[in-house]
Amino acid sequence: MGTLSEKEILAQVKRICNNPEFKSKSLLCRFLRFVVNETLVGHGDQLKGYIIGVEVLGKDTDFDPEHDSLVRIHAGRLRRLLKMYYLEDGKDDPVVIEIPKGGYQPQFKLRNPEGLTNKTTMAEASGEKSSPRIEPSVAVIPFKNLTGDPEKDYFAHGFSEEISIELTKYENLRIINCWHRPDPKFENDRDLIGRYGARFLIDGSVQLNGERIKVLVKLIDASTGMQIWAERYNRDLSLENLIDIEEDISEEIAKILGSEIGIVFRQLAEEAIRLKPGRLDVFNAMLHFYYFEAHQSQELAVKSCYILEQALKKDPDSGEINAMLAAIYGNAYALDLPNNAGTHEKMSDLAEKAMAMDPDNQFIRIIHVFKCFLQNDWNCFFNEVNQCLAMNIYSPMRLGILGFYLALSGEWDQGKTILNKAMNKNIGYPLYLYGATSLYHYRKAEFIKALEEANKYDIPGLFWGPMLRAACLGQLNRKKEAKRQIINLKQLKPDFEDKAPYLISRFVKEDDLVENVLEGLRKAGVKISINPAAF
């Protein structure tokens, strides 16, 4: 422990457990207090999975940590939460508590033993230029009141409060609420931007114009001081709808910025894909997965699979990493990507493993929905969908995926309703959702509407976009336009004509609709083979 006293260490434990992130996770606080106290009384070398399982997790005395990974899972969560804490709220704390992998005995260190100040990093001390922090932290600054009426301050500040509340619904975001606006004479000072301790800042203002209210919101990257997004919202105003306006606009902003493929994670993901593999950690591996979800291609699937496999070696007890890797393998199987042998079995094993680790995790359950869908296990599928919907999903991506698979399973009306909710005024959803909205109209012989939706399926690396467009154009007898789509289709999937029924039925679960899509493709000029060996 060096020069650290027991009093200093216990004070640090109290500081950590009083942090809002830890307050909501009482089990992890109990875990931390237990291993620290045992170490302080000289029992640190006796901290094993069994004693923690019994004393902290309340397991029975016949608990076997070799066959039950619960202790390892919670230890991994505690390590990740401590790491995030010291990146954010605890970045200036005098004492650092770590639990090295491979054991449960904590280590205690004084901050900056090299003599550096709390605000100086090793890179800065050596003259190196530091890279932007790839972390999902957002500070929400109280909005400016530009109404001309000081009594409306509460309304302007209410927007920032409401946005903070909405953003906390996205579990991978770290939200910092600021109680006071900075002094106006410093507002354009980039150094001041950095003092909030967040990678991104949300700022805004509220104005009144007669019976209309105008809200301006902007997102700033604190690492550069650059504004990367802004939007204006105008609403009719009355005393009766003030709260509704705040809630409606705040929810919309949170979905645009905070979802897995919203603006914050898109920015971080684009930086993560430029990192060398050796610098990638588990969180950056997750960012790669979100980038893959937004830009799906064969090349990204291969790269994301490799990175997630490496992350799984570092953190085998991460339920989310297991689920993400399951999703990658499931995509390889469903899209018939090259070298996909065994991917169906791998997807199934990883999805089940993730569920056993963390069944209350929304994302993990949604990947389990995907697994049941691919296996045509409809009892499991509908049970899992209902479980997910009962979890109050806020993410447009997660909600959209549920609607996508519900529609394709044959529950078109319910699926389309959920898709509409997920896609309404949001940008944080994957474009492949348009495959389901296109087929929704196609099956009703509304081929012009189906084509409009298929035209939004703008994912250059997937064959489904040109396939849907070719089928719609075939049904509309627009063969000249269809020819270009067929050329693109064959470039993306050279063996499509041999495997068409098989490939379509991977996602479309109604036999009549599969045949209807094949009919449109034939009318467009695609030569569909009937070759059982291909299936």
Image (cartoon, rainbow, N blue to C red):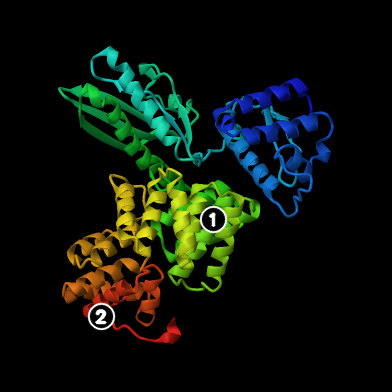
The residue positioned 31% from the left and 17% from the top of the image is: 153
At a point 56% along the width and 50% down the height, the residue shown is 359
Q: Relative to 90, does residue 343 appear above or below in the rendering?
A: below
Which quadrant does the N terminus fall into?
top right
Callout 1, which amino acid? Ala
Mark 2 = which residue? 522
Q: Of helix, strand and loop, which one carries label 1?
A: helix
Disc 1 packing (10 Å; few <14; some 14–19; many ≥20): many
Residue situated in front as seen by the camera: 71 or 465: 71
The answer to whether residue 38 is seen in the rendering is yes
* Of 257 and 112, the residue lying toward us: 257
Q: Position of residue 59 (x, y in %)?
A: 72, 43
- The reply, left or right, for residue 30 in relation to residue 294 is right
- The residue carrying pointer 2 sits among few (fewer than 14), some (14 to 19) or many (20 or more) residues within 10 Å by Cα, namely some
Query: What is the x, y in percent for residue 299?
Result: 45, 64
According to the picture, the residue beneath numbered tag 1 turns out to be: 323
Q: Is residue 412 above or below residue 333?
A: above
